[in-house]
């Protein structure tokens, strides 16, 4: 059996080697390192794939979130509501801009932000909600869009983990993750579902004025050469990364189905075990419906409910099976983000999840022998 990896990027590279090598070489030969044709080509292709009017590439996903918030004109003192259970980048940029992060609890089954908790956290200072489509599945967008509209709030999607996922609204209509709010941010970090070979990110929006404003912000606030109209940043996707992304984008749907296929096999093996809670898909399809694209399984995350999560983790390490604990500490308890307003009683779910979650190897190259070995090892231990 091949050595099991948490993410297997070399296997994926083999499949696109020729194409990627050729375009990287072309970038070097034409020396169009910044804003070259590869970047513009990728931008257009991603706009078409997502069905969104504007993609603005930038240097990484954290920048994308920050720039989205700058683009919306959020000002110090404005409150921005986001999930307590996510990667720190989301709350980091809110704090960095001098905005006030307001962390709220999540749903125990989907791990995504809880709309009722969002509603309760709204004050006259609230300006935006940042749902994170965690682990590859969209946050409850019907409810969140309604809350945003009723309260005149911006909705910024953190889509770093769910590119390629589709959300089905209650009326049956569908939209892709990252195209539902006022603006969205994504990351092309190598291990993300659409990853490049370094850092990369992008902002998406359907709003022409906002897109224009953001295109200036990413480029030192310039709309006309050497005229700096607003305070901007320097955040660019380089051409070599764009070349990699152009090779991968046409394969993204296939990558996502391969991840779903692995999740389906995990689910099948784990189903019925009382010490395990399987990841829930919003469509209640259990990851088993063949056409379902509601979940792109950036992570396959189990909850271990018999108190043995850490012991299982140690056991997996012994057996050479990598795993991840996403996330071990709620953001409201991180030193940088504590706030006297937070009360432990407001975060029962996150406080529980940090003790129970474990993410198993998940990537496009997992084979049946590996999945069989992983599931048998987990089940034998549990
Ligand atoms: C990866 C990630 C980011 C940050 O992306 P980078 O490209 O690493 O800056 C932001 N939010 C979430 C939820 C992420 O998973």
Image: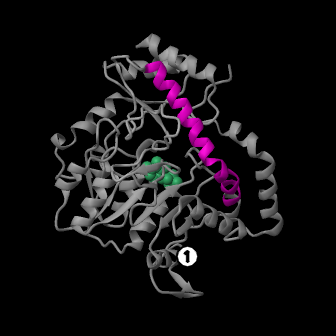
Q: Does residue 236 appear left or right of residue 303 in this picture?
A: right
Q: Is residue 44 above or below residue 367?
A: below
Instruction: Please name the residue shown 71% across and 70% down the image.
Output: 36
Which residues lie in the magenta part? 242-270
In the rendered structure, does residue 267 fall within the stretch colored magenta? Answer: yes
- Disc 1 target residue: 219
Q: Nearer the viewer, residue 216 or 180?
A: 180
**Is the residue at mark 1 in contact range of ligand 1, meaning its CB lies under 8 Å from it?**
no
User: Mark 1 packing: few (<14 Cα in 10 Å), some, or many (20+)?
Assistant: some
Q: Does residue 101 appear anywhere in the picture?
A: yes
Measuring from the top left, give residue 237's x and y in whole percent: 61, 63
Q: Is residue 304 magenta?
A: no
Depth check, front residue: 90 or 371? 371
Q: On the rendered image, what quadrant is the N terminus found in?
A: top right
The prevailing secondary structure element of the residues shown in magenta is helix
Image quadrant where one finds the C terminus:
top left
Query: Relative to residue 307, is residue 357 depicted above or below?
Result: below
In this view, the residue in front, 60 or 338, is: 60
Could you say where residue 297 lies in the image, as x and y percent from the top left? 49, 39
Left or right of 310: which side holds 147? left
Q: Is residue 97 above or below residue 374?
A: below
Quarter of the image for residue 241 reads bottom right
Query: Is disc 1 placed on a helix, strand or loop?
Result: loop
């Amino acid at each position: 059996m091949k050595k099991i990896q948490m993410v297997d990027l070399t296997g994926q590279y083999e499949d696109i080697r020729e194409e990627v090598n050729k375009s990287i070489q072309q970038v070097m030969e034409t020396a169009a390192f910044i804003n070259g044709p590869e970047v513009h080509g990728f931008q257009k292709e991603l706009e078409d794939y997502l069905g969104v009017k504007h993609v603005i590439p930038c240097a990484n996903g954290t920048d994308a979130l920050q720039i989205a918030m700058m683009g919306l004109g959020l000002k110090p003192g404005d409150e921005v509501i986001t999930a307590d259970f996510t990667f720190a980048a989301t709350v980091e940029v809110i704090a960095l801009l001098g905005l006030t992060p307001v962390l709220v609890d999540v749903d125990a089954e989907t791990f995504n932000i809880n709309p009722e908790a969002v509603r309760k956290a709204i004050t006259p200072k609230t300006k935006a909600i940042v749902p994170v489509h965690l682990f590859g599945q969209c946050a409850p967008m019907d409810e969140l869009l309604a809350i945003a509209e009723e309260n005149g709030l911006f909705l910024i999607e953190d889509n770093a983990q769910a590119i390629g996922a589709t959300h089905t609204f209650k009326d049956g209509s569908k939209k892709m993750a990252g195209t539902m709010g006022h603006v969205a941010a994504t990351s092309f970090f190598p291990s993300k579902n659409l990853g490049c070979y370094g850092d990369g990110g992008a902002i998406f929006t359907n709003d022409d004025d906002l897109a224009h404003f953001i295109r200036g912000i990413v480029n030192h606030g310039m709309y006309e050469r050497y005229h700096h109209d607003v305070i901007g940043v320097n955040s660019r996707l380089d051409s070599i990364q764009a070349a990699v992304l152009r090779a991968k984008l046409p394969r993204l749907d296939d990558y996502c189905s391969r991840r779903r296929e692995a999740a389906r096999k995990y689910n099948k093996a784990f189903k019925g075990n009382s010490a395990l809670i399987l990841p829930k898909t919003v469509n209640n399809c259990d990851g088993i419906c063949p056409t379902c694209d509601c979940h792109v399984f950036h992570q396959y995350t189990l909850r271990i409910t018999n108190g043995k999560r850490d012991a299982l983790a140690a056991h997996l390490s012994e057996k050479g099976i990598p795993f991840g604990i996403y996330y071990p500490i709620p953001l409201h308890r991180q030193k940088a983000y504590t706030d006297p307003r937070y009360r432990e009683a407001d975060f029962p779910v996150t406080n529980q999840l940090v003790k129970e979650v474990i993410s198993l190897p998940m990537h496009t190259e997992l084979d049946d022998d590996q999945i069989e070995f992983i599931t048998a090892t987990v089940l034998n231990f549990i």
